Amino acid sequence: MSPQVPTLHYFRFPGRALAARVALFNALGTEGWKDERHSLPRFKKDQQQQLHQDSERLNDGEKGNFVTSNLPQLNLPCGLKVTQSHAIARYAGKLDGQGANAPFHVRGLYPQIAKDALLVDEAVAIVDQILLLTPKDDDKETRLRKRELYRQTGFLRKGLEILEGRISDSGGPFLLGEQLTVADLYVRSPLCDVFETGQFEGVAAEYLHEFPCVQRCGAAVLDHPLVQAYKKAYKT
Ligand SMILES: N[C@@H](CCC(=O)N[C@@H](CS)C(=O)NCC(=O)O)C(=O)O
């Protein structure tokens, strides 16, 4: 039986789920949704097993718990299972006004004004594209060489330059000025996190210093009262 509240499945780190988690917390408090956190290694193992079982019983109509072998996934009480972190974050950001009991109700996490929404969508897509296009060759030497190009002239620089310009134009600290949106949560995590935690192999954390508005936006997200309340309730 499906739970009576939306359930977000993701791992035990912020990654691609911070925006959705904060937006769900904003709209629904801690009781109105379930934050299901999985161990990444165990999830990978389970997915491998599932793949094996699926190939053994082709066409028998059975389906695993997850639509793809990636998370996040949002399961709604109606039975719908939805993939793609940005779609989930935007949906959660639109739940404005539905969480009367939510401790911090910030309106406009996903803006209603079309031009603002356009800028939010662009920023989220840029963060996603930066991660997707990052060279991941098995051979370390090749990978690092390509990452160096990616850093110097590739989409890593281009994407960060666009974000830097947008935040600068709005006056900051956020993409839309004073208004926090799901785009800023994406700038925080995964974008700033991957640099600041040293996870961006081949690119030093200091690289982000070249984009001070982006860096300031990532820091301002952590200071925002909604994010502080979220962290108090969920830690990560
Ligand atoms: N486009 C997808 C990408 C999801 C994705 O890549 N998820 C990663 C974690 S951030 C994952 O599930 N990895 C599982 C694995 O590495 O086996 C989204 O934005 O939701």
Image (cartoon, grey):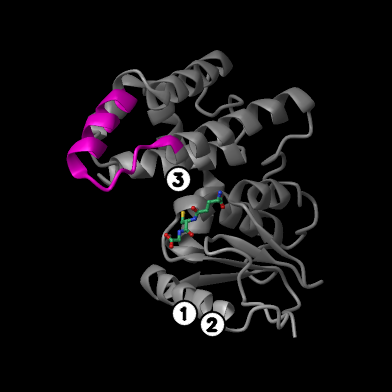
**Most prominent secondary structure in the magenta stretch?**
helix
Residue wearing tag 3:
189
- Residue range corresponding to the magenta coloring: 133-151
Q: Amino acid at mark 1?
A: Gln
Looking at the image, the residue that sits furthest to the left is: 141
Q: Position of residue 171 (x, y in %)?
A: 54, 17
Looking at mark 1, is its residue's CB closer than 8 Å to ligand 1? no
Instruction: Using the image as rendered, state which of residue 203 and residue 35 is in the foreground.
Output: 203
Looking at mark 3, is its residue's CB closer than 8 Å to ligand 1? no
Left or right of 72? Residue 102 is right
Instruction: Using the image as rendered, state which of residue 119 and residue 134 is in the foreground.
Output: 134
Q: Residue at x 59, y 51 (%)?
A: 85
* Residue 105 visible (yes or no): no
- Image quarter hosting the C terminus: bottom left
Residue wearing tag 1:
49
Residue wearing tag 2:
53
Left or right of 116? Residue 53 is left
